[in-house]
Image: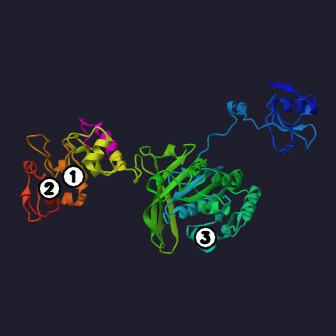
Amino acid sequence: MTRTVESAADVKAIHRKHLGSRVENVPRLEGRNVLHPENGSSESLRAEERGNIVPEDLERSENVPGTFQLPTYFNVAAMLGGTLPDPPTPDVCARTDGVGLFYRNQYNAVFGDPESGKTLLTDYATVTELAAGGRVLRVDLDHNGPDSTIRRLLAMGAPVDVLSDPNRFLYIEPEDRREMGLIADHMATWGPTLVVLDSIGELLPLYGSSSNSADEFTDTHRIVIKPLVRTGACVIGIDHLAKGGESRGFGPGGTIAKTRAIGGSSIRVTVDVAFTPGKGGSAHLTINKDRHGGLRQHSPTADKEPLAGKFVIWPSDDGSMRPEVKAPDDGERNPGEAVPQADIVAIAALDPPPKTIKDARECLRWNNKRASAAFKAWKAASQTIGQKPDAAAAGPTLVDSRTVGATAFGPVSESGVRPELDAPQESTDEVGETALDVMHCLHADGISDAKIADSLNSGGYRTKTGKEYSGSLVWKHRTRDEKRRVMVGQGPAR
């Protein structure tokens, strides 16, 4: 319900009636435009001059007599009229296919273990942004030092004149929260296009905040990060992983508020080949969060954290670095989530086949995470049972849950069996266990795939002395220990 405001006394009466308390001095937000509730225009309002219609619980500014401030309502008419911009798309730090990793006008994050390549990735983002004509601020709270930072940027191709231009590039190591506040205020007029905060773990203590406190992180985010985002810049915060195994799977270490605050993308960096001066290196980039979906849209979809790309630094003889973010191939998996083929084979070799993750876990004596991943992958592969694979198709194929080809040790043929091995026999009461039926037992005893593979010979087993056991009947009355001894070449099963 609304009513026309006639005088300041009416406003006081309205507040006493609906708010139950006298209106104190409410400061006016100077220069703030609001949506006029009558005509949709965006302007500051003076009620006594124009007789505006305002909500009954609207607070009055006593600093400016007769002046009122409306809340900023979302302009739905503009959205429905098609005048709003398209959804945000990532265009900072582009991959080889032109798709960026990070969003402008948003807070983004990069996180991972120490020396995984997090800072190097933001160095590359800095160089590409400067090459595109942007303006970059580097806030170094992690004690990298200007000398090493500038040297890396030069090695990646940043021009000397651009790094020397204070209108294009700024580097600072803030000493305290006062200086950090001055930086945020200055950026409102300097107008960066990219801001790198290295790191969030050092920024929070500057404000007496804990990484584990949602409220304290939110306060620091509001004081420092939000003002930087309001400049329109792509803001990237570098963070670290937690030490706990389960916590590492969720995102950056500390409170979940860190992930909640991400308005753009959050990229997990996992080292592939360690980055070494003069030798380069590489790291897998996976999508932990993508609020707008612009990066996921152009990445594989098979994993919970899809592969966003591979960050590679190629070394050169002259000491320079050639970095790039290689776009993932269609269907390429996140190496951290892909299930080892040997685990799938071990699940498939169980007789009777497991009905639940619990069945598989208890039989194989695996932890729940490993059993769950392998069981789900086996179930997905089982959906294709009975379908003849395309002749040109390569890679492992599970043919039946009780009749398994040696897919853990190489490609399989159309029949689902590795060519150099005989077809496995079915597991029946009369025949006993086949070679691959006992794989899960051997895995549980710590026998590696390599030792198992070396011990296989034409569907049977070979001892260290060369004695062969090619039939499956030999296994029917053997204990697990006897089987294990044969598999590692410690002697025949007598």
In the image, the segment drawn in magenta is 374-391
Q: CA distance from mark 3 to mark 1?
A: 50 Å
Mark 3 residue element: loop
Looking at the image, which residue is at 70% across and 63% down? 168
The label number, if any, that marks residue 235 in the structure image: none
**Amino acid identity at mark 1:** Cys
Q: Secondary structure at mark 1?
A: helix
For the N terminus, the image quarter is top right
The one of 438 and 155 positioned closer to us in this rendering: 438
Discs 3/1, front? 1
- Looking at the picture, tell me which residue is in the foreground, 25 or 158: 25
- Other residues around mark 1 within 10 Å, as few (<14) / some (14–19) / many (≥20): many
Circle 2 packing at 10 Å, graded few (<14), some (14-19), many (20+), is: many
Mark 2 residue element: helix
> Among all residues in the image, which is located at the extreme front?
20
Amino acid marked by disc 2:
Lys
| Up/down of 41 relative to 214, above or below | above
- The residue to which callout 3 is attached is 143
On screen, residue 107 versus residue 298, left or right, reads right
**Neighbour class for label 3 at 10 Å: few (<14), some, many (≥20)?**
few
* Residue 122 screen position, x and y as percent: 57, 61
In the rendered structure, find residue 441 and report the number of the disc placed on it.
Answer: 1
Residue 130 visible: no
Q: Which x, y percent locates residue 228?
A: 69, 54
Residue type of the residue flagged with mark 3: His
Point out the image quarter for the C terminus.
bottom left
Q: Nearer the viewer, residue 475 or 161?
A: 475
Is residue 306 in the magenta section?
no
